[in-house]
Image (tube, grey):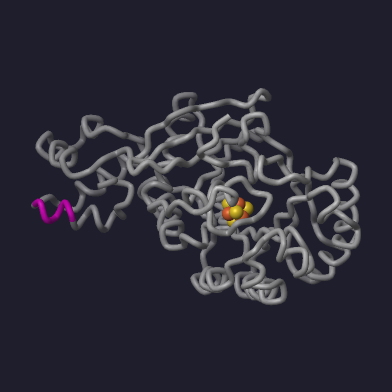
Amino acid sequence: MLIYDFTLEALQSDLKSWGEPDYRATQLWQGLYKHLYDTPNQFTTLPLHLRKKIEERFTFHSFESLIHVNSEDGETEKVLLRSDDDQRIETVLMYYDKRRTVCLSTQAGCAMGCVFCATGQMGFHGNLSRGQIVEQVLYYARKLSQRDDQVSNIVTMGMGEPFHNYDATMDALDILNHPDGFNFGARRMTVSTVGVIPMIERFTREGRRVNLAVSLHAATNELRDQLVPINRKYPLESLLRACNEYVSLSGRRISFEWALIDGVNDSLEQAQKCSDLLKGLVCHVNLIPLNPTDGYAPSGASQVTATTFRHFLQSHGIPTTIRLRRGIDIHAGCGQLAGLNWK
Ligand code: SF4
């Protein structure tokens, strides 16, 4: 059993059933998440008999790292991981000045079928467990700690739709947030969704302090239906209602992602409709010129078009940035993670 699938309480109850006091589970937890140990013999605060039992009961790795690549600009790296049930997923690390952002996967493939996305093009292959989501962060945390560095931000924008694997994703973020362990601040985590409304509502009800990002990509149902098929089930009016409710109940800002596609959704007409939709909402828009994938012909908007789009939204009172394109040469950019067709 993968040890990161266990909460501290679950480890306590396991160890208790072996006759161990509660503090042993805390020592184990701290070894895992403060010291980043990944083999039983590193837990030198635990007696030998307990380390042996832990070794028999738990595994510390569900993934084998198959390939690791660095982008030419040295600011992005990604790893192809194979799970013990032969799912392939990718995890990305991006460097932005002092920030070290892990972009993790929550599913192998994705059922949402966004037409411009390599993960959507490969279809759905399975959910990751909470422990497998946690393991991806620990992978890069260990790597960075060898250079006296650490993860500063976590986003769930890798493979999969996090709100289609809600419980595992949220449990993983809770484990990473635990104050006695990894102690990673909720405000440095961002969960993203393409618009699974019941889960946005649940996220709002739960009052989590994790940031929320919604992938919008179009401001009319007609266009969004084509780009993001889930829009046919959860159309824009309902989506914006859920987003407004989130902002008013949480008192937090919401982010919107918009992949700018040349000649498809980068017109001033779309910008106008977008500003109408988001009017009065405490939000921020990230524009990302679309990254190329094999299964979708249109290309990303030019820098000039992206800048014009941004100016339009900003002049209508909507804070907007153009996201830096990263890791395109290693297929690590937004929407490029495919897990199978490694280039
Ligand atoms: S953009 Fe996100 S939700 Fe859409 S297919 Fe790709 S991974 Fe899935």
- Is residue 176 found left or right of 343 in the rendered image? left
Residue displayed at 37% across by 38% down: 63
Seen from the viewer's position, the closer of residues 47 and 286 is 286
Q: Is residue 260 magenta?
A: no
* 232 versus 108 height, above or below: below
* 146 versus 207 height, above or below: above
The image shows residue 112 at horizontal and vertical percentages of 58, 59
Residue displayed at 52% across by 55% down: 186
* 318 versus 305 height, above or below: below
The image shows residue 170 at horizontal and vertical percentages of 45, 59
- Is residue 6 found left or right of 305 in the rendered image? left
Seen from the viewer's position, the closer of residues 159 and 137 is 159
Seen from the viewer's position, the closer of residues 106 and 148 is 106
SS assignment for the magenta stretch, majority: helix
The total of numbered circles placed on residues is 0
* 207 versus 193 height, above or below: below
The image shows residue 146 at horizontal and vertical percentages of 44, 25
Residue displayed at 74% across by 51% down: 259
Residue displayed at 53% across by 52% down: 123
- Is residue 324 found left or right of 211 in the rendered image? right
The image shows residue 264 at horizontal and vertical percentages of 82, 54
Q: Which residues are magenta?
A: 14-18
Quadrant of the snapshot with the C terminus:
top right
Task: Choose top left, top right, bottom left or bottom right for residue 248.
Answer: bottom right
